[in-house]
Amino acid sequence: MKTSTTSIPSTEEFFASVADKSNAAESALRGDYRHADAQYVVQQDWDAYTPEQHARWRRLYQRQLQLVPGRACDEFIAGLTELDAADAIPHLEQASDTLFKATGWRLVAVPGLIPEHSFFEHLAHRRFPITVWLRDESEFDYIVEPDIFHDFFGHVPLLLNPVFADHMQEYGKGGLKAMGLNGLTQLARLYWYTIEFGLINSAQGLRAYGAGILSSGGEIEYCLSSPAPRRIRFEVERVMRTLYKIDSYQETYFVIDSFQQLLQDTAPDFTPLYAKLNGLPALPADSLLSGEINLPTS
Ligand SMILES: [Fe+2]
């Protein structure tokens, strides 16, 4: 989803940019984009999900549900409970109503990955895009493109938290600004290390809040217990300089103290920071700089 253009890409440019980054011989994206509107929104054809797909959802959900106590932050568990989506692939409109009452956010159905500009536009207007398709059985443990399980289970519970919900909107606004400031690479790293793979300090110890962790059967344990990765205090500039791996567990996790900190640190104008960082080399994903403390496992 990374582009270096500052203008709004056409649909053709979007697919071409995805194809350039894919090793797949055929179509790079698996979603059905034929009926998407200008913002890539589609109808969720809930009746088209098969009994097997609902059963797979239940198994995915139950596996993660067993793993979240003591590993996910309390705010995530509270949101997950409120959504009450254990029994079947959720109706996005119904879940959207629950979400809207809590924080004024809505869910919109999309075919899969969408261009950055559309993604940021949705977030900036308190709409979260949810992929409509569910992974195949062969992808039960690992999936390359985000599916409805990742998008819903991983991302939606925290959108019921008012502070995190405000932070997500600020991130979307920041994304729209970054497109004109040559800052998308840095902003993508911030997204990766917070919204997807962030850890948070709690009174009970380290907990996960990132959707990539919370929807993963393996990384949810690894990120908190393995001695292999680094766990470093969150600092915006450090995060924006740090490369990441998309095909393995993270080599570094960044730890926030609160969602209020995340909101405050994401809201500022990053114009001078992008200018500074574009003149500096990126840091490898496994860096530990002089003076940094590798926090102990929980
Ligand atoms: Fe995600």
Image (tube, helix red, strand yellow):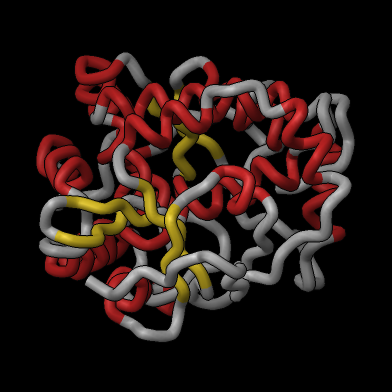
Quarter assignment of residue 10: top right
Along the line of sight, the residue nearer the viewer: 217 or 170: 170
Q: Residue at x 72, y 22 (%)?
A: 177
Q: Residue at x 54, y 19 (%)?
A: 124
Along the line of sight, the residue nearer the viewer: 124 or 46: 124
Q: Is residue 5 visible?
A: yes
Along the line of sight, the residue nearer the viewer: 66 or 273: 273
Q: Residue at x 22, y 71 (%)?
A: 298
Picture layout, residue 123 above or below residue 155: above
Along the line of sight, the residue nearer the viewer: 2 or 10: 2
Picture layout, residue 207 above or below residue 164: below
Residue 21 at what x, y percent from top left? 80, 62
Query: Quick check: 80 left or right of 233?
Result: left
Query: Quick check: 235 left or right of 103?
Result: right
Residue 94 at what x, y percent from top left? 24, 26
Q: Residue at x 36, y 67 (%)?
A: 216
Quarter assignment of residue 8: top right
Total numbered circles: 0
Query: Quick check: 99 left or right of 187?
Result: left
Residue 62 at what x, y percent from top left? 16, 65
Q: Is residue 37 visible?
A: no
Residue 166 at what x, y percent from top left? 39, 22
Picture layout, residue 152 above or below residue 220: above
Picture layout, residue 150 above or below residue 13: below
